[in-house]
Image (cartoon, helix red, strand yellow):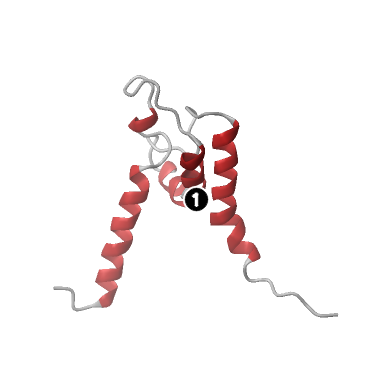
Amino acid sequence: MFRNKRYLVLVFILVVALVFLNCAPGNERWDQEINPGSIAGFWTGVWHGFIILISFIVSLFTDEVGIYETNNTGWPYNLGFLIGLYCSVGGVFHGGKKRRKR
């Protein structure tokens, strides 16, 4: 079906992006009017911190997606968000450094 690998990679990236955005902050899953009592917890914070780059880019073009979920459990969500943020953004910058021997 796909003769060129570029098309296959592009389709894969689009599918993965759509899956990531399904669980992005600010969607209906955490809306208290639609789902009362549904509050984002620790693991949701880890996920939202991990996909922050994708969420930020999408939030520039739409008001439906945010980068931080306001309906959360408090410090557990914040801790998870920081862990996910470090894994996605902070780990990238520190992974390439080599230590010098003195």
Residue shown at 31% from the left, 22% from the top: 34
| In front of the other: 16 or 79 | 79
Please rate how many residues cluster around mark 1, counting C-alpha atoms within 10 Å: few if below 14, some from 14 to 19, many from 20: many
Q: Name the kind of residue labelled 1 in the image.
A: Phe
Instruction: Tell me where residue 35 sits by quadrant.
Output: top left
Q: Quadrant of the image for the C terminus?
A: bottom right
Residue shown at 29% from the left, 73% from the top: 6
> Relative to residue 38, is residue 41 drawn left or right?
right
Residue furthest toward the right?
102
| Circle count | 1
> Relative to residue 25, is residue 88 drawn left or right?
right
Q: Is mark 1 on a helix, strand or loop?
A: helix
**Relative height, residue 15 to residue 22 (above, below):** below
**Relative height, residue 43 to residue 101 (above, below):** above
**Relative height, residue 30 to residue 97 (above, below):** above
Residue shown at 26% from the left, 63% from the top: 11
Residue shown at 57% from the left, 35% from the top: 76
Question: Whole-percent x and y of residue 81?
Answer: 55, 42
> Relative to residue 1, is residue 91 drawn left or right?
right
Question: Whole-percent x and y of residue 55?
Answer: 44, 46
Q: Quadrant of the image for the N terminus?
A: bottom left
Residue furthest toward the left?
1
- Residue marked by disc 1: 50
Question: Whole-percent x and y of residue 27?
Answer: 36, 34
Question: Whole-percent x and y of residue 78?
Answer: 58, 37
